[in-house]
Structure formats: structure tokens, C-alpha cells
Amino acid sequence: MEDGPGRVEGPSAVDAAVRFVAMQPGGARRILLEHHRRDDGFCAGCLTSPVNWPCVVGVIATKALQLDVES
């Protein structure tokens, strides 16, 4: 990917979100209580429109949970 004008170096938005969730006490687990796979393969927490599991929020929370376990 080519750097465009105004591009800022640093972590991606997803990486920043993972770190933010990981810093919240119990944050990842609370998110995953809502955003989990339903029997039909969709996310239980994404209610506005059906989203296949894993949703972006679920991925962020799962990665944050892994960071929490590793530290």
C-alpha cells in the first residue's frame, strides 16, 4: 500500500482499538458476552444488520483478551 498525503505512521485503527479494550478491566469479556456466534452463524451483538461471526467488534475483543492473557 502506498503512503498517501497526510498519512500518519503508527498502529492501525484496529491495533489501537485492541489495546484500548485490553486496558479496560473486564472489557473484552463484557464485549464477548454480547458479540458471540449465534446458531445461524451471525453475531448476536450486531443487531442493526446481520453480520457473519466473527464481527469486527468480536475480533477486536478476542485479540484484546489474548493480550490480557499474555501479559
Image (tube, grey):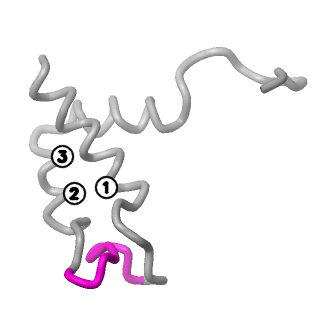
Question: Could you give the CA–CA distance between mark 2 and mark 1, rounded to whole angstroms?
Answer: 7 Å
Locate residue 67 relative to residue 47 in the image: left or right: left
Residue drawn where x is 43% and y is 55% of the image: 56
* Labels 3 & 2 near each other (Cβ < 8 A): yes
Locate residue 37 relative to residue 57 in the image: left or right: left
Q: Position of residue 67 (x, y in %)?
A: 21, 27
Residue drawn where x is 78% and y is 23% of the image: 7
- Element assignment for label 2: helix
For disc 1, the marked residue is 58
Residue closest to the eye, 3 or 21: 3
Question: Could you give the CA–CA distance between mark 3 and mark 2, rounded to whole angstroms?
Answer: 6 Å
Image depth: mark 2 or mark 1 in front: 1
Badge 3 density bin: few <14, some 14–19, many ≥20, Cα 10 Å:
some
Q: Where is residue 28 in the image (x, y as percent from the top left)?
A: 19, 46
Extreme residue in the front direction: 40
Residue 31's tag is 2
Q: What residue type is labelled 1?
A: Gly
- Element assignment for label 3: helix
Badge 1 density bin: few <14, some 14–19, many ≥20, Cα 10 Å:
many
Task: Report the predominant secondary structure element of the magenta stretch.
Answer: loop
